[in-house]
Amino acid sequence: MAILLTKVNVWLDVIFTGLWLVVVVGLIGHFLLSIPTGRFRKKWILKEWPKHDWAPPALPKFMHFQHLAMMGLLGFSGMYIRFPFFDGGRTAMRYVHYVAMVIVGLNYFWRLWYAFFSKERDYKEFAIGKKDLQTVLGVGAYYAYLSNSKPHVAKYNVFQKGTYDLFALLMLVQGFTGLSLLTQPILFGLSPREVLLGWLPGSVAMAGAWARIVHYSVNWLFIILVTVHMYLAVAEDLPCSLDFFGLKKLEVDPDAFHHHDEHESAPAGLAAAHAEGD
């Protein structure tokens, strides 16, 4: 079984590295296609970026920045633990990983509290409803350069909502499997691995080995999804991305609506686009 797990790890390295490279090449090709379609000139030369009728609040921006920074540390330290590309850093990287893990976990529950229980709760903005599903083809056509109109029925389009919801679910999986890798006794002489995986049939050690594979796979999924997320955030709505990192204040247009079709106006009263390219 140990030999089988070793082969699985090698195949995961090959598959995910190849998939990430394919995604990067695809994103480069997508950006180059913006030139003949006119989107490059419109956004990067004429500066005709999506308009917004409000700016992102400070607290979600802080949580977003903190989360991104810690996820970057987790991804980097996790890859180093898997591939120690310089000598003598494995122990230090494990501590970096643990500290970043705690901060990400606290930030995750803080964001959930903000979404569901704060005065500015925004959980409804991430819910995918029937109207969102009806826009899937339209939003897909926009990203595929088959249409210049990107339909919204709320602040985020259906692809954005799906991505953010997927992030939230993957975070739970990553947290569970990450804690399952800890073998030091913490509670009543039991390790997190024994508490979380001890109820499974078979060897706890073997269950931990498979948890490591899931954890590593999800780490790669985050790397791939964040690569796409960052590309779209910059390519589709650079001003909002700069505002998120405090580099440039987002200009607010009270008359802006979330419909981005040049030849149509959106119904009054609907929220403006926010982080359009995320």
Image (cartoon, rainbow, N blue to C red):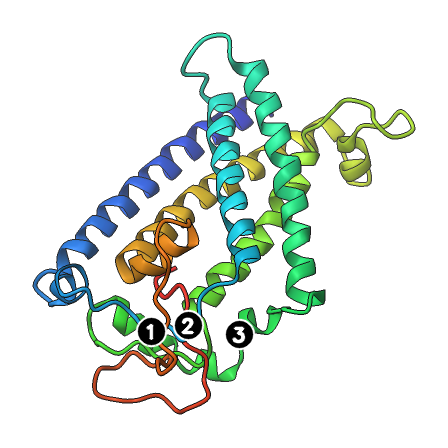
Disc 1 from disc 3: Cα separation: 14 Å
Disc 2 from disc 1: Cα separation: 7 Å
What residue do we see at 14% from left, 65% from top?
Answer: 46
Dividing the picture into quadrants, the one containing residue 188 is: top right
Q: Secondary structure at mark 1?
A: helix
Amino acid beneath label 3 = Ile
The label shown at residue 101 is none
Give the residue at mark 1.
Answer: 139
Confirm or deny contact between disc 3 and disc 2 (CB under 8 A).
no
Give the residue at mark 3.
Answer: 128
User: Looking at the image, is 268 positioned above or below residue 120?
Assistant: below
Left/right of residue 231 with respect to residue 106 in the rendered view: left
Amino acid beneath label 2 = Asn
**Which of 91/173 is in front?**
91
Confirm or deny contact between disc 2 and disc 1 (CB under 8 A).
yes
Give the residue at mark 2.
Answer: 157
- Residue 78: image location, x then y, percent: 51, 29
- Residue 278: image location, x then y, percent: 39, 59
